[in-house]
Amino acid sequence: MRIWTGVLTGILAASIIMSSLFIYLGYGSGTLIVEMEDPPMDWGPASHVYINYSAIMIHRADAANESGWLTVIEDGGEINLTDVVKVSKPIGEEYLPAGKYNIIRFNVTSALVTVDEANYTATVVNGRLNVPITRGGIQVNAGGTTHLVIDITPRITGSEAEGFRLVPAAKAAPG
């Protein structure tokens, strides 16, 4: 009888541990670090590009189109793209519920470009970016840290006489 009591106690303890682990991994939270980089400089006439961006949001893969958006970077920020050519730079992090995420969203709100050593404000053409995350999205695991790299690829057009325009584009992938 004592053997059966010990076996049943062991099975019960293992069940409780497994259930707790399942709940923690399935419903806990993990850290998402968002990084930005730029491929080799191909900015047209500009030698430097500085952008300001709005808050960055990420979408849960299992949510409907306009629901499931969580804020990763509340206030947005600014970045000198010269500093992130071929290298990523962390721009923010957030503690998120564990799960799969498939789209990152932000706006490029303004831009400054350097052409022939002079700075010009560039008009941003359609700065709203909804960027699908490649490789099927990213998985944020409870208690873990996940990296997401936004590879921003702006194109600069125009001239000093007609004004410069920045056409933003981006892709995102697990880092």
Image: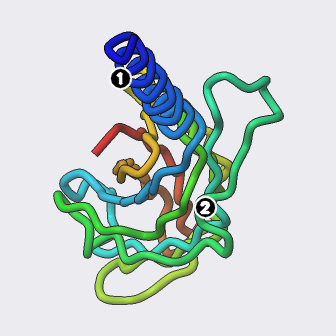
Q: Is residue 86 visible?
A: yes
Residue at the image point whose x is 50% and y is 71% from the top: 51
Residue at the image point whose x is 41% and y is 51% from the top: 143
Q: Secondary structure at mark 2?
A: strand
Indicate the quadrant where residue 66 lies: top right
CA distance for labels 1 and 2: 24 Å
Where the C terminus falls, by quadrant? top left
Give the amino acid at mark 2: Val
Q: Is residue 72 left or right of residue 91?
A: right
Front residue of this view, candidates 128 and 123: 128
**Colouring convention used in this rendered image of the protein:** rainbow
Image coordinates for residue 60, horizontal then vertical, percent = 64, 33
Image coordinates for residue 137, horizontal then vertical, percent = 45, 28
Q: Is residue 81 left or right of residue 170?
A: left
Q: Is residue 149 left or right of residue 53?
A: left
Indicate the quadrant where residue 59 lies: top right
Identity of the residue furthest to the front in this view:
1
Please, is residue 49 above or below residue 37 in the view?
Answer: below
Q: Secondary structure at mark 1?
A: loop
Image coordinates for residue 30, horizontal then vertical, percent = 47, 51
Identity of the residue furthest to the bottom in this view:
118
Front residue of this view, candidates 66 and 15: 15
Front residue of this view, candidates 125 and 162: 125
Q: Please give the label number shown on residue 156.
A: none
Residue at the image point whose x is 44% and y is 24% from the top: 9
Please, is residue 14 above or below residue 98 in the view?
Answer: above
Q: Please give the label number shown on residue 108.
A: 2
Q: Which residue is mark 1?
A: 135
Residue at the image point whose x is 33% and y is 39% from the top: 174
* Marks 1, 2: nearer the viewer: 1
